[in-house]
Image (cartoon, rainbow, N blue to C red):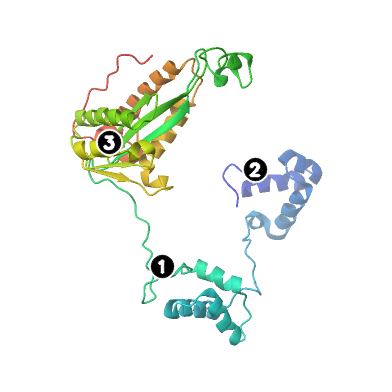
């Protein structure tokens, strides 16, 4: 299947064929011009001579006949035995073998997987599907769900790092040498309201529990300034700072409920994860910075732009501030 920018779309194939037939250019030269092989040119020329322009469209790659395909009646029998008697793949295979059905054990297991009944926990005692369709995590109102996360990025030495001077350059190596030249990391703590997508970010020096508690209190004050005075649920991953008892007590005292997502399932905290991706693409790695402070200043400007000016598809192509209960002053002291 071709895409819109492919050199050999049906229109491109017609142009290539006419270069050979109308202009009289040899197939090898046409192949070099269109950056394809000579047999490719010969194939499309033959199809054009056989069927005209209709022959230049893509043909289905599925075989017309498959002699080894499992008959539909056998597939129905496999599903019936699995749902009705809860038989395993090995027992179903033995039952089919006794009926002189030529099918391998691996094929039976593959069909159970395709039918979505390879695990008994996916079936009810009556043989019906027990697996629920995946639902979407949606916030019903501002403050219903606030997502927290931490992104760890390397600090930028004064004068710029390797992105400014080039990887392996003398200036980049000099920034990491000498006493006290250890660069370290910056921890970007972010909080995103699940309903309005209003975001609050701070660049801090660690991700300890006490640091996270301080950030949460300041984020709560930021949301309160925008009319989100009640945080009903705070969603985090299972990091050590979020598993700390002091953080949980702080959330329960200042908000409603602390919910930690299922381990190794970052999509359950997807709103702030997507925000981190935007932060990386549009700020952190968008251009080289001369110092860590310069990048932190740029982060503050971008967060302001994200909240009050940047259109968001979840907000109907309006900025997140358009969905908060109370407006706030978004004028910054300086945009330099």
**129 or 64, nearer to the observer:** 129
**42 or 51, nearer to the observer:** 42
In x, y percent, where is residue 258?
Answer: 27, 43
- Residue 72 visible in rendering: no
Q: Are marks 1 and 3 in contact (CB under 8 Å)?
A: no
**185 or 66, nearer to the observer:** 185
Rendered position, 257 above or below 300:
below
Marks 2/3: CA distance?
60 Å
- Residue 121 is marked as 1
Check disc 2: other Cα within 10 Å, few if <14, some if 14-19, many if 20+: some
Q: What element carries label 2?
A: loop
Q: What element carries label 1?
A: helix
- Residue 184 visible in rendering: yes
Q: Is residue 60 left or right of residue 310?
A: right
The answer to which quarter of the image holds residue 197 is top left
Q: Is residue 315 left or right of residue 59?
A: left
Residue appearing at x 31%, y 36% in the figure: 192
Q: Give the quadrant of the C terminus.
A: top left
In x, y percent, where is residue 270?
Answer: 38, 43
Q: In this view, does 70 lie to the left or right of 87?
A: right
């Amino acid at each position: 299947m071709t895409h819109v920018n492919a050199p050999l779309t049906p229109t491109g194939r017609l142009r290539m064929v006419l270069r050979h037939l109308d202009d009289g250019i040899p197939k090898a030269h046409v192949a070099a011009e269109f950056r394809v092989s000579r047999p490719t040119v010969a194939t499309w020329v033959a199809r054009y001579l056989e069927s005209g322009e209709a022959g230049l469209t893509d043909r289905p790659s599925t075989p017309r006949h498959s002699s080894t395909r499992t008959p539909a009646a056998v597939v129905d029998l496999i599903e019936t035995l699995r749902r009705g008697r809860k038989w395993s793949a090995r027992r179903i295979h033995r039952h089919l073998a006794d009926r002189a059905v030529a099918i391998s054990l691996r094929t039976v297991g593959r069909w159970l997987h395709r039918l979505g009944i390879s695990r008994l926990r996916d079936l009810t005692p009556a043989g019906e599907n027990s697996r629920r369709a995946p639902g979407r995590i949606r916030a019903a109102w501002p403050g219903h769900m606030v997502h927290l996360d931490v992104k760890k990025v390397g600090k930028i030495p004064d004068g710029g790092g390797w992105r400014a001077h080039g990887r392996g350059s003398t200036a980049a190596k000099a920034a990491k040498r000498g006493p006290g030249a250890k660069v370290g990391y910056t921890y970007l703590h972010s909080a995103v309201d699940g309903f309005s997508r209003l975001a609050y970010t701070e660049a801090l020096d660690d991700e300890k529990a006490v640091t996270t508690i301080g950030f949460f209190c300041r984020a709560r004050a930021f949301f309160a300034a925008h009319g989100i005075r009640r945080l009903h649920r705070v969603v985090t991953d299972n990091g050590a700072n979020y598993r700390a008892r002091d953080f949980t007590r702080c959330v329960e005292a200042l908000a409603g409920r602390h919910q930690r997502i299922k381990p190794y399932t970052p999509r359950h905290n997807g709103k702030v994860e997507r925000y981190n991706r935007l932060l990386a693409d549009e700020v952190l790695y968008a251009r080289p910075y001369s110092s860590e402070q310069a990048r932190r200043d740029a982060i503050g400007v971008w967060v302001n732009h994200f909240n009050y000016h940047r259109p968001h598809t979840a907000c109907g192509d309006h900025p997140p501030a358009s969905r908060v209960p109370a407006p706030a002053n978004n004028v910054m002291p300086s945009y330099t």
